[in-house]
Amino acid sequence: MKRAILVVLDSVGIGEMPDADQYGDVGSNTLGNIADQVGGMEIPHLEKLGLGNIAPLKGVAVMDTPEGAFGKSAELSVGKDTVTGHWEMSGVILEKPLNTYPEGFSKEIMDAFESKIGRKTLGNVVASGTEIIERLGDEHVKTGYPIIYTSADSVFQIAAHEGVIPLDELYRYCEVAREMLVGDWQVGRVIARPFVGEDGVYTRTENRKDFALDPFNKTILEYVKEAGQNVMCVGKISDVFNNIGVTHSVHTKNNMQGVDETLKFMKEDLGGLLWTNLVDFDMKYGHRNDYVGYYNAIKEFDERLPEILETMTEDDILILTGDHGCDPTTPSTDHSREYIPILVYGKNVKPGANLGVRRTFSDIGKTVLEYLGVQNDLYGESFWSDIKA
């Protein structure tokens, strides 16, 4: 019973792409710059798999014979966000970027939204999530008006104090926005951003929820499900795909719960695709320019990696990768246009196989489908024949 375990280390990029200048990301290198800033990374288990063989990383050795296959991938789609990255991995290539709103949302959009939810709103600006609640949290608590903000990504974010607007109500507001923000008003994700606290001291909670567009074409999730196999999603994966093609799903509040839930699925007698997103790297550290916290999160995952490897069966393959960059060492707090690392491990994987530089993230999805024996018309080129032991 074959199983492909795909773990996305959210925002773990490995160097700027050639078109980084078009995105304002020249010099971005999430892993490389973090390694430099901390004086070298100590991540022995990722090192053994071949992470240091992909690109120079201070403190991470180049292995003569890595235990895994290694390489990196460029992004073919236009964009650098979660939806674009995960969709491309699944076989959806975006030739036009999803809408962004660098000046905030139009009066037409905001009037329609306020009318539908029956409340005024605050904000409607480009801002970081922590900064906006510090600035407008008190006014929100006083008025009960939800805070609307966006970023360089295609997102409509709604922040609300859990004691002022209950979670169910906040999620309903997000569903209203999701139904609205299509067509000319399209955004990739509507995101609930609940927080708690008082008197100007506020903290975001772990009850975030994403509401994405439906993918524009058939994805690996649908192919695997239609083939009668399981599609197990951990973290925000099911949200990114609006549950299309999903057979099992569990949401998580942090990276370590994500690892725990991944291990639980691995211990069940379920073949197919197990797809996990570990979001802390991006949400807690990348966007907050906290390179020390980011590094500690990488180390924490590295310490748990042996548990994953030891739980794998003879017919499992593990693919570790990213979905974009979010370099915490640059002035920007936005995502960065970077290559993503690819590490593949399993009893059936040739140690030390070099995947080179892939043209599209979709090669990962194509490889998963070939390994699982699923016929498909997915865009991309499988690298299974290059790494098969």
Image (tube, helix red, strand yellow):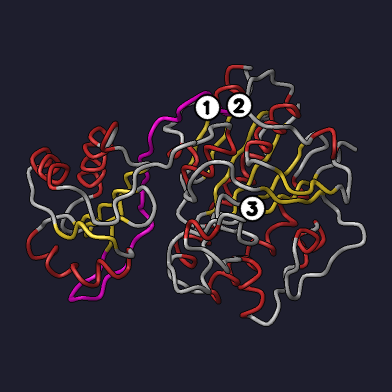
Report the Cα–Cα distance between label 2 and label 3.
26 Å
Asked if 68 appears above or below 1 in the picture, the reply is below
Look at the image and say whether residue 184 sits in the magenta stretch. no
Closer-to-camera residue (41/355): 355
**Residue visible at 59% across and 46% down in the picture:** 75
The tag earlier along the polypeptide, 1 or 2, is 2
Dot 1 amino acid type: Thr
**Residue visible at 87% across and 63% down in the picture:** 63
Q: Secondary structure at mark 1?
A: loop
The tag earlier along the polypeptide, 2 or 3, is 2
Q: Quadrant of the C terminus?
A: top right
Q: Which residue is mark 1?
A: 247
Dot 2 amino acid type: Asn
Report the Cα–Cα distance between label 1 and label 3.
27 Å
Closer-to-camera residue (280/62): 62
Q: Residues within 10 Å of mark 1 (few under 14, many from 20)?
A: some
Instruction: Tell me which segment is drawn in magenta.
Output: 196-221
Dot 3 amino acid type: Ile
Drawn side of residue 302 relative to residue 281, left or right: right
Residue 145 position within the rendered picture, expressed as x and y whole percent measured from the top left: 12, 56
Q: Which mark is residue 260?
A: none
Q: Secondary structure at mark 3?
A: strand
Drawn side of residue 58 relative to residue 226, left or right: right
Q: Are marks 1 and 2 in contact (CB under 8 Å)?
A: yes
Residue 381 position within the rendered picture, expressed as x and y whole percent measured from the top left: 72, 32
Q: Which mark is residue 230?
A: 2
